[in-house]
Image: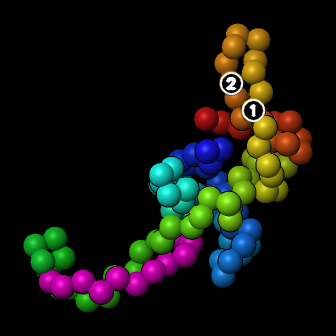
């Protein structure tokens, strides 16, 4: 998985195409990500100890990881990611367009 938690990503396919947001959760088993303020779903809940009132709750839904691209902080565009090995045998993620090292 080249997409990590707290990465800024852009949705490139589906009904939320063109929206950007920060990755809140990565679910590697299902190859899905949850992005902040993107792909809201409605959940009908009963009153309980956690939720006294109940009703309809809106929260972010998961998006398949193939439908998002990481945004480069330098060129500010969605880009593919390369892996590069530095001189001290440390692997880093690199923007494919401008060569900027992305934070881990």
41 relative to 90, above or below: below
Quarter where residue 98 is shown: top right
Neighbour class for label 1 at 10 Å: few (<14), some, many (≥20)? Answer: few
Q: Is residue 33 visible in the rendered structure shown here?
A: no
Residue 42 in picture, x, y percent from top left: 40, 84
Horizontally, residue 75 falls left or right of residue 10, namely right
Q: Nearer the viewer, residue 103 or 64?
A: 64
Residue wearing tag 1: 83
Q: Are marks 1 and 2 in contact (CB under 8 Å)?
A: yes
Residue at x 57%, y 67% (from the top left corner): 63
Of the residues under marks 1 and 2, which one precedes in the sequence? 1
Residue 78 in picture, x, y percent from top left: 79, 56
Quarter where residue 16 is shown: bottom right
Question: Magenta residues, as a range?
Answer: 37-47
Q: Is residue 104 visible in the rendered structure shown here?
A: yes
Q: Secondary structure at mark 2?
A: strand
Residue at x 47%, y 52% (from the top left corner): 29
Q: Nearer the viewer, residue 102 or 46?
A: 46
Residue 41 in picture, x, y percent from top left: 45, 80
Q: Residue furthest right?
A: 97
Q: Residue furthest left?
A: 49
Residue wearing tag 2: 91
Indicate yes or no whether the magenta region holds residue 34.
no
Residue at x 56%, y 72% (from the top left corner): 38
Residue at x 68%, y 65% (from the top left corner): 67
Quarter where residue 97 is shown: top right
Residue 65 in picture, x, y percent from top left: 62, 59
74 relative to 18, above or below: above
Quarter of the rendering occupied by the N terminus: top right
Neighbour class for label 2 at 10 Å: few (<14), some, many (≥20)? Answer: few
């Amino acid at each position: 998985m080249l997409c990590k938690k707290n990465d800024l990503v852009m949705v490139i396919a589906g009904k939320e195409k063109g929206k950007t947001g920060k990755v809140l959760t990565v679910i590697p088993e299902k190859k899905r990500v949850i992005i902040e303020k993107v792909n809201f779903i409605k959940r009908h809940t009963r009153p309980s100890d956690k939720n006294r009132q109940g009703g309809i709750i809106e929260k972010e839904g998961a998006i398949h990881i193939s439908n998002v691209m990481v945004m480069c902080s330098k060129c500010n565009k969605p880009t593919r990611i390369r892996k590069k090995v530095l001189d001290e045998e440390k692997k880093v993620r690199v923007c494919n367009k401008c060569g900027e090292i992305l934070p881990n």
